[in-house]
Amino acid sequence: NLSLRLSDARLPDGQGRQGLNPASIISFMKLIVGLGNPGTSYAKTRHNIGHRVAEAFAHTLKASWKSDKKLKSRVAQIGQGDKIFFVALPELYMNESGLAAALLVSHFEIDFKKDLLVIIDDAALPFGRIRLRAGGTDGGHKGLRSINEVLASKGYARLRVGIGSPDSKGIPLEKYVLTPFLSEEEKNMGALLERAQEACKRWLEEPIERVMEWVNQEA
């Protein structure tokens, strides 16, 4: 049960850092980016779990989405008192995620080393497990690789969401990530999304070291 309760303090439509300067009136600006491929045909695939977590988080907080062509993303702007944060879903393919991330970071003047959280799928983690890291290599993930290259940095937080490994299924990884979850996995999806949303909430509210301690503890 998420305890974060946000008032309807979203920025007016069309007013980002131009026309209204959020940094002058708020205590922090944070950005959560859920990675995935655009389009309904990819929506329920394993590769899009980052999208699903971010979408669920914004939905839980009753946020509304706006498609922004300049930012090449759908963006939800959410606020509570003196705090405003953004949840974004790039509308580019996974291997182009860096372009959208860079546009978002620049537009909202985000300090990505401490105020950016990227949510991705991870085939090295069993389904249902999540891991939070303050930085690191891309681990073979094309979305992270793109962001690392465009930002010229590996120093931003990433929440890895387990989608299970294709090893026992005899499917190449690049094909496996584009398959849908099994019906049994979908039955347990609610619990996974809730835990991942709790991780996002804690990342917004607490020092990342403390959040990593909570997220990375063994189940």
Image (tube, grey):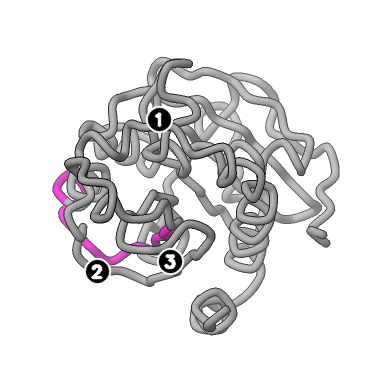
The numbered mark, 3 or 2, whose residue comes first in the sequence reads 3
Residue at 65% x, 40% y: name it.
Answer: 56
Tag 2's secondary structure? Answer: loop
Q: Is residue 68 above or below residue 45?
A: above
How crowded is the residue under tag 1: few (<14 C-alpha within 10 Å), some, or many (20+)? Answer: many
The spot of residue 168 in percent (x, y) is 27, 54
Q: Amino acid at mark 1?
A: Pro
The quarter of the rendered structure image containing the N terminus is bottom right
Tag 1's secondary structure? Answer: strand
The spot of residue 138 in percent (x, y) is 21, 58
Residue highlighted by disc 2: 136
**Position of 45 compared to 153: left or right?**
right
The magenta region covers: 149-160
Q: Amino acid at mark 3?
A: Lys
Q: Is residue 23 above or below residue 93?
A: below
Q: Amino acid at mark 2?
A: Gly
The spot of residue 36 in percent (x, y) is 39, 34
Is label 3 in contact with label 1 (beta carbons under 8 Å)?
Answer: no
Residue highlighted by disc 1: 90
What label sits on residue 114 in the rendered view? 3
Q: Is residue 213 above or below residue 53?
A: below
The one of 139 and 66 positioned closer to us in this rendering: 139
Which label lies toward us, 3 or 1?
1
The residues bearing labels 3 and 1 have C-alpha atoms spaced at a distance of 20 Å
The numbered mark, 2 or 1, whose residue comes first in the sequence reads 1
The residues bearing labels 3 and 2 have C-alpha atoms spaced at a distance of 14 Å
How crowded is the residue under tag 3: few (<14 C-alpha within 10 Å), some, or many (20+)? Answer: some
